[in-house]
Image (cartoon, grey):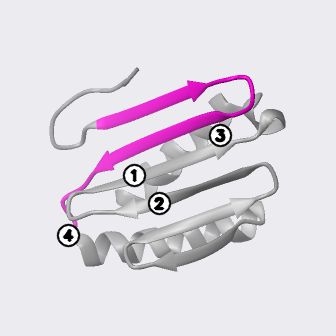
Amino acid sequence: MPVGRGGHNAHYVYIFRNARMTQISVERKHSLGRDAARAKAEALVDKLSREYDLKATWNGDRVDVARSGANGSVHIGDDSIRVELKLGMMLSMMSGTIKGEIERALDKALA
């Protein structure tokens, strides 16, 4: 179920849960253009990789991220950035906190 508001700075958040994992999807609209958005995403991914021991692998305008108990990707578009993350059973208990951190980090990076 999407949560958010429409418009230029639309916020879209999805959380899906099943018995094995939780999936988080957060999308933020931007007006930076793809190159500027990618530069901001690169800085954000570098910071989060250091803080949370993530392994990041870039493939064009997508970066795949992984660590024990979580994996996902960040997609950079012309007018949006979308983060999709799957959490294992242990981290799924913290999905609300993790989703909030993703939202805050994206909002700060795109400000």
Who is closer to the viewer here, 65 or 10? 65
Q: CA distance from mark 2 to mark 3?
A: 15 Å
Disc 3 crowd rating (10 Å Cα; few below 14, some 14-19, many 20+) is: some
User: For the residues carrying marks 4 and 2, which lies nearer the camera in this image?
Assistant: 2
Name which residue type carries label 2: Val
Quadrant location, the C terminus: bottom left
The percent position of residue 81, horizontal first and vertical second, equals 35, 56
Task: State if disc 3 and disc 2 touch (CB < 8 Å).
Answer: no
On residue 98, which mark appears?
3
Name which residue type carries label 3: Ile
Name which residue type carries label 4: Gly
Tag 4 or tag 3, which sits nearer the N-term? 4
Question: Residue at point 46% right, 78% down?
Answer: 59
Question: Residue at point 37% right, 45% down?
Answer: 27
Disc 2 crowd rating (10 Å Cα; few below 14, some 14-19, many 20+) is: many
Above or below, 80 against 40 in this view is above
* Residue ID for mark 2: 74
On residue 33, which mark appears?
4
Secondary-structure class at tag 2: strand
Q: CA distance from mark 4 to mark 2?
A: 16 Å
Q: CA distance from mark 3 to mark 4?
A: 27 Å
Disc 4 crowd rating (10 Å Cα; few below 14, some 14-19, many 20+) is: few
Image side of residue 94 versus residue 62, left or right: right
**Which image quadrant for residue 32?**
bottom left
User: For the residues carrying marks 3 and 1, which lies nearer the camera in this image?
Assistant: 1
* Residue ID for mark 1: 82
Q: CA distance from mark 1 to mark 4?
A: 14 Å
